[in-house]
Every structure is written in C-alpha cells, then in structure tokens.
C-alpha cells in the first residue's frame, strides 16, 4: 500500500497534477493553506468594536490587507465639508434660522469605512458624541463666512436595500425623497459616506435644488457630477493605488519575496520589472496593512480625477503568469464594480496575473463563498468579504 501511495506521489509530481489540497509548482507542492492571501478594501475587523481580526491577518505568513486609510479618510471628508462651509454664502442657511441642518447616508453600520466617515463628518461639525450609531449625535457648530452657526443632524440612515444589501443607492433615493418632504428647508447640507448613495440622493425627484452634497469614492459619475456643478465634493480613496497595490503584493509573494520586500517592491521602490506605483502608500506593520491615502476632490481639482487617468508607473512586466482567484462582495456595489474592478482589470494583465473573479450579492457570504472553490487551479487568493468579520469562512475553506 505504501508503495502504491509513493508511486502515485512521484507520478503526480512528474506530471504536474494537482493534489487534493495544493498546487504543484516547480516540483514542489504548495498547499492551499500556504498560498498568498490578500484581503482587500474590507478590512477583517469586528463590526461593533472595529478591532482588526488578527487571527485572519495571521492566517499564514503570506497574508496581508491592502486598502486605504479609513480613519484618515473620515477626517479628509470632514475637513472638505468645513472648508467648503467656511466660504459659503449666508444663503446656505436656507430658512435663515441660524442652524445648518444636514442629513446623513451612513452605508453599513457594521463597516469600519462607514463608521470612520460618520465620525469624520460629525467631528468636523461638532455633532459627534463618541458613537457612530445613526441616532447618536448632538448639536454642533460651524463657521460660515466668519459667523458661527449651530449644526443639527436632522437624521442619519444606514441605507439597507429591500434585499438586505448595504450602501444601497436606491434606499438613499427613497430616504432623500422622504427627508425632503419631512424637513423641507431645514436641510442645508447632504452628507453621504459613498458616491453611490450620494448619486442616489440626487435621483430623488424632490431633491432640494442647489443644496450642497458630499460623497466619497471619486467614482467616474460623481466626478462628472462635480464638474457639472451637481455634486459639491467627494473623496478619492485612490482606487488605482489600491487595485495596483493588491496585485503588486500578490505578485511579490508569488515571486517568492519575503520580509519588507513584500510591501515595498513596486510600491516604494521599483520591482524587478521596473514597475512602481506612483502614489505613496503606508505600511502598518501591526495589522499587516498596506494603505493608500485619501484626497478631497472638489470643483477646484476634479479634472485630475476623471476616468481613464491610470498610473503610468505600471507597465507590461515580464513576470511569470500566475492565476489568482478574487472575490468581490457585491456585483452591484458602485465603487467596487464601477471603479475598483475596472482598475484591477487594467493592471492585472500588466503584472501577468490572470484573475478569476467571483462576485456576490452583498447580502450573504454564501453568495460569494459558494463560488470560492477549485483552489488547486490557483496560485493565490484575494478576498473582499460581504461582512468584515467573515474571514474565517474563507480561510476554513483553504485549510483543506
Ligand atoms: C466604499 C464604498 C463601498 C464599500 C464596500 C467602501 O470603501 O467607499 O463605496 O460601498 O467600500 O465595502
């Protein structure tokens, strides 16, 4: 029996067959549990406390997170709003009652990006109580044209779709319609934690014309809306740096790089093929996270963020072709489908990475997990979870 097993093993190695739980590569069997694993854009974390899921991050030595500075992004969004208000005309207070009323589209109450943006906007406007809960806010203040106004959050809503999906643009259209009726001229400002929901608000037939509206993501349609004067501002989380960064870290791991080379080659220094991401990214060692920086996008600089501006620092590499299985939590998410995915599809061929993309429905992890299979066909994995605390569901599958 022993002889049969070892002959089968020799046969498999010689013929390059896949093993039950691994892929044969240059004579070595790489077990799925030892392959590179990148979490991207949704950081494995506790939906209530926001603490990073280090069990997931330490799944193996080749596990990393690539995203953007979520907390810093909230601050950028808040500052963009108060900078705008500082020079706004007195007519911004539509009913002239000395109170700036705003409504807030939150996104996903259990998502650290939502929490950070709610916190950033509320802190800037003085309405922050220490909690990102929709109902938890206090009266704040802001300076407009040298005069101090009171600030009131009229209402904040998670924006969950009828199907249970989060960051839902249709829910935002409906909420905005209701708010416009309920609060009328008390609404002086609309804040949305992503562009999809902001564009959704603008779709409401009774959207109060001229009321400033701020989003987040710098999606192509939002950038055009800023250019057309329909939207006031957004924040770029630098989708090109994030998508290219995800692929570059995978490339480095697949090329056998270790230590700091994993998060510096092609990022802060050129890689072996002469590629380097132009934007600077920060590496946070404690959480194994490589993060892009955020920038405010307004009427002053929107043209620099128009679609089609790709990073010229990434050119066709001569690296060996590798296959990566990548998941996206919701095929209908505006940011991931209209910004992130096209960026991945642009950079992956340049890095000689062949992507197999599976997309979920944004509601149940099963919608993605059911298609997260055939691991032996892949050299590495990249995961964007439906819920930020679901990492284990994916790593458990790779353990066998
Ligand atoms: C984006 C949102 C998106 C969410 C999905 C965030 O980083 O800003 O637009 O819906 O990721 O996880």
Image (cartoon, rainbow, N blue to C red):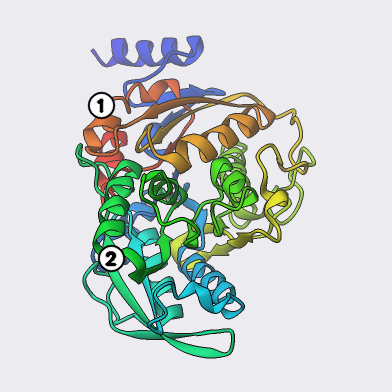
Residue count near mark 2 (Cα–Cα under 10 Å), binned few <14, some 14–19, many ≥20: some
Taking the view exactly as shown, the residue that stands out farthest to the right is 274
Quadrant (top left, top right, bottom left, bottom right) of the C terminus = top left
The quarter of the displayed image where residue 17 is located: top left
The residue that mark 1 highlights is 370
| Horizontal relation, residue 35 to residue 145: left or right | left
Residue 95: percent from left, percent from top: 39, 75
Look at 67% across and 44% down and name the residue there: 306
Residue 16 or residue 277, whichever sits in front: 277
Q: Nearer the viewer, mark 1 or mark 2?
A: 2
The quarter of the displayed image where residue 144 is located: bottom right
Q: Secondary structure at mark 1?
A: loop
Q: Is residue 110 visible?
A: no
Residue 80 drawn above or below residue 328: below
Taking the view exactly as shown, the residue that stands out farthest to the front is 95
Look at 26% across and 46% down and name the residue there: 392
Look at 34% across and 80% down and name the residue there: 128
| Horizontal relation, residue 263 to residue 310: left or right | left
The residue that mark 2 highlights is 183
Residue 312 or residue 194, whichever sits in front: 194
């Amino acid at each position: 029996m022993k002889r049969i097993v070892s002959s089968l093993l020799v046969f498999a190695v010689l013929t390059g067959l896949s093993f039950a739980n691994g892929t044969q590569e240059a004579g070595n069997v790489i077990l799925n549990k030892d392959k590179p694993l990148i979490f991207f854009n949704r950081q494995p974390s506790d939906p209530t406390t926001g603490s990073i899921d280090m069990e997931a991050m330490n799944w193996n030595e080749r596990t990393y997170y690539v995203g953007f500075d979520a907390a810093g992004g909230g601050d950028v969004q808040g500052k963009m709003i108060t900078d705008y208000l500082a020079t706004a005309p007195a007519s911004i207070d539509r009913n002239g009652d000395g109170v700036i009323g705003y409504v807030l589209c939150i996104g996903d109450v259990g998502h650290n990006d939502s929490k950070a943006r709610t916190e950033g906007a509320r802190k800037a406007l003085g309405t922050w109580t220490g909690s990102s809960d929709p109902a938890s806010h206090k009266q704040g203040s802001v300076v407009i044209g040298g005069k101090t106004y009171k600030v009131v959050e009229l209402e904040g809503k998670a924006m969950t779709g009828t199907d249970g999906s989060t960051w839902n643009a249709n829910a935002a259209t409906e909420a905005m319609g209701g708010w416009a009726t309920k609060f009328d001229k008390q609404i002086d400002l609309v804040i949305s934690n992503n562009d999809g929901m902001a564009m959704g608000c603008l779709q409401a037939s009774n959207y109060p014309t001229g009321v400033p509206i701020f989003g987040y993501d710098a999606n192509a349609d939002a950038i055009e809306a800023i250019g057309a004067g329909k939207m006031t501002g957004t924040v770029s989380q630098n989708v090109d740096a994030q998508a290219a960064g995800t692929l570059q870290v995978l490339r480095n791991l697949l090329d056998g790089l270790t230590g700091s080379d994993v998060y510096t080659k092609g990022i802060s220094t050129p890689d072996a093929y002469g590629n380097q991401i132009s934007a600077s990214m920060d590496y946070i060692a404690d959480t194994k996270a490589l993060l892009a920086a955020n920038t405010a996008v307004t009427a002053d600089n929107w043209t620099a963020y128009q679609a089609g501006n790709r990073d010229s620092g990434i050119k066709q590499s001569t690296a060996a072709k590798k296959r990566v299985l990548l998941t996206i939590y919701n095929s209908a998410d505006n940011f991931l489908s209209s910004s992130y995915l096209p960026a991945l599809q642009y950079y992956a061929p340049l890095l000689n990475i062949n992507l197999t993309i599976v997309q979920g429905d944004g509601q149940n992890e099963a919608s993605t997990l059911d298609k997260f299979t055939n691991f032996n066909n892949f050299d590495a994995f990249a995961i964007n979870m439906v819920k930020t605390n679901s990492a284990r569901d994916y790593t458990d599958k790779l353990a066998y």
